[in-house]
Image (tube, grey):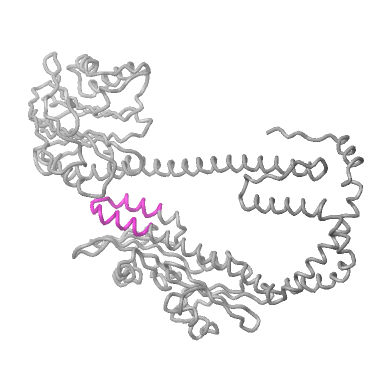
Amino acid sequence: MTTAYVPTERLVRQDASGSLGRTLVLRLTLATGAVLLALGVALDAVGRSTIAGLGMDRERARIAHAAGVLDVRLASIGRDAATLAGSCAARPTIDRETVLHLLTFLADGCGAFDALVLRPDGDLIPRKGWKPPAGYDPLARPWYKAATASGGKPYAITAPYTGAVSGELLITVAAAAGSGPARPTVVAIDLAVPRLLDDVRALNRDARTVRAVDADGRWILHEDAGQLLGGRIDGAPEGGLWRRFQHDRTMVWEHLDDRYALIAPVGEAGWALVVDLPTAAIDGAAWRVTGLFAAGTGLALAVLALAVWLTSRSIILPVRRLAALAQRVRGGDLAARADDSRDDELGLLARRFNELIAAMHERDAMRGRLAEAQSAQARLEGQLTLANDLRRAVRPADTPRVAGAELAVRRIGGRLGTGSFHDLLTLDGGRLALVVGEVQGDGLPAALFLAQLATAFRLACRAGDDPGRALALANTQLVGQDERPCSATAAVVLCRPAEGRLALACAGRAHPLLVLRAGRAEWLQVSQGGSLGRLADLAFPAAQAALAAGETALLVSDGVATAANAAGERFGEDRLVRAALGAAGRPPEGVVDAVARALAAHLGGEPEQDLVLIAWRSAPA
């Protein structure tokens, strides 16, 4: 925005020709007297009791705000704890490392002193990695009793107690989830009482003391730690005020000697804030102001009539309109505009005021857009970091060694951090399980689904020699849990490399396995089952094959054939077959290397998507 400044010469001409410049000093003097008179009369009429009431209204608003902030914080922690408990209860197979990641993310976000998860099988997962002392019984701890006796509420808050390991004075927000005869999953978030007390007190620094009690009148926050272990408000000077508060649980207050005592409700938590305010903090300053203006009332009366006549039309009314406009702008109304039709200094001021409001509107809009973008970026980066950590955690650490077989694995690309996965499992009897696939979904939900999928495959592949049954078992574990926008395609090979026998089954894809034999390449034909994680009771027919000595099997992930270069041309199955045939007779490492080089040449570099190549053959005698 371009601002047009008025030259000094024009202002001089306005001062010489207009009435405002010639009478400004006189009118301001008279206006001062009029303002003193008006304020003095008004304060005297209102009275000191009313002024004190206005001060109390201000403090009551501050205390209600402090109670609301505390209520929102406790409710937010409670809902997050209940959400994590429900997720862990719905996914009993989720691994311990994943639970610890989620628990740490939750505890750091709410500034907790400590946090833990107790599973139904007694597995205790603490955030800080501490070991329980001898004789430690989680079922006897206050947080467990509060969570399991919450009476249908999503979470519970304990009374203050001493931590068994830290020795700190704590309260705990705890939530339980699960059903049936088994013990529930419990998530406990520990909050240090001294820090919570400091946080609440910081919301109203005029207060002498800030305390809190639960619904039964027991002290929860108190500067005297001895009062937190059994002390009650009933025996305190505020006991009578507490009985009034219990009648309808709205804010009450009364004057006690040299202080005001107030009790305010804390919403869902069922707590109440108990605040002491010095009398001087409420009405001391107002009393001094009353005396000052009362002394100036006599002087102001002498000039009142003349000041009103001279200034109301030219200065007071326009200034009041500008002041009211400034108040509207302060309240957030940036659409307001001043009347700038006057051709004098006040008109110039109104025009500059309008330009300032327009600039503020544009600035706030830019700040809002920047804040939204930064917040969205921070959330996305956090989810991507956690998702990538989960993906790395479920990848096999290295290529296993299998007696009587040569095996090569190549993982290429992956700048986009997609959900491709693979696994290689050595089983008893010289068997080998190979899995490749891809998760359809984004962010943290897809990463969690990938972790569950990897666990399901590692269990299912040990159930026998039928890869179709392994896919069905994995699908059964994934279907019927919480609804999610994720599914997966996969191919499973169960083989005995030393004997040259293999079986293949597919879910949501075709042509994953290429066999190189006697100068030709053949795709192993297999029926394509549905994607995993969407429908129950799916069948996945298996295809059988045998590898003779020197023959190589190549298992590829979904995106190898569909990877496209800058011109949009796909790599395709024909190029894949030619690259593999060109390396026929080489060890498996040479086959995957030849395919990877051909793919890089076609794309002009590495693919953005995660791709996996796995080749094997019987080792020469």
Left or right position of 596 against 473: right
Q: Main secondary structure of the magenta part?
A: helix
Left or right position of 187 against 280: left
Residue 191: percent from the left, percent from the top? 44, 65
For image coordinates 51% across by 84% down, the residue present is 239
Labels in figure, total: 0
> Residue 428, relative to residue 31: is it above or below?
above
For residue 560, say whether it is visible.
yes
Left or right position of 205 against 550: right
Q: Nearer the viewer, residue 65 or 109?
A: 65
Left or right position of 58 against 613: right
> Residue 571, relative to residue 372: is it above or below?
above
Please report the bounds of the magenta region as a residue range: 80-105
Residue 155: percent from the left, percent from the top? 35, 64
| Viewport quadrant of the N terminus | top right
Residue 560: percent from the left, percent from the top? 26, 24
For residue 430, say whether it is visible.
no
Residue 385 colored magenta? no
Residue 203: percent from the left, percent from the top? 57, 64
Q: Quadrant of residue 490?
A: top left
Q: Nearer the viewer, residue 36 or 365?
A: 36
| Viewport quadrant of the C terminus | top left
Q: Quadrant of residue 119?
A: bottom left
For the view shown, which residue lies furthest in the bottom direction? 235
Q: Nearer the viewer, residue 39 or 250?
A: 39
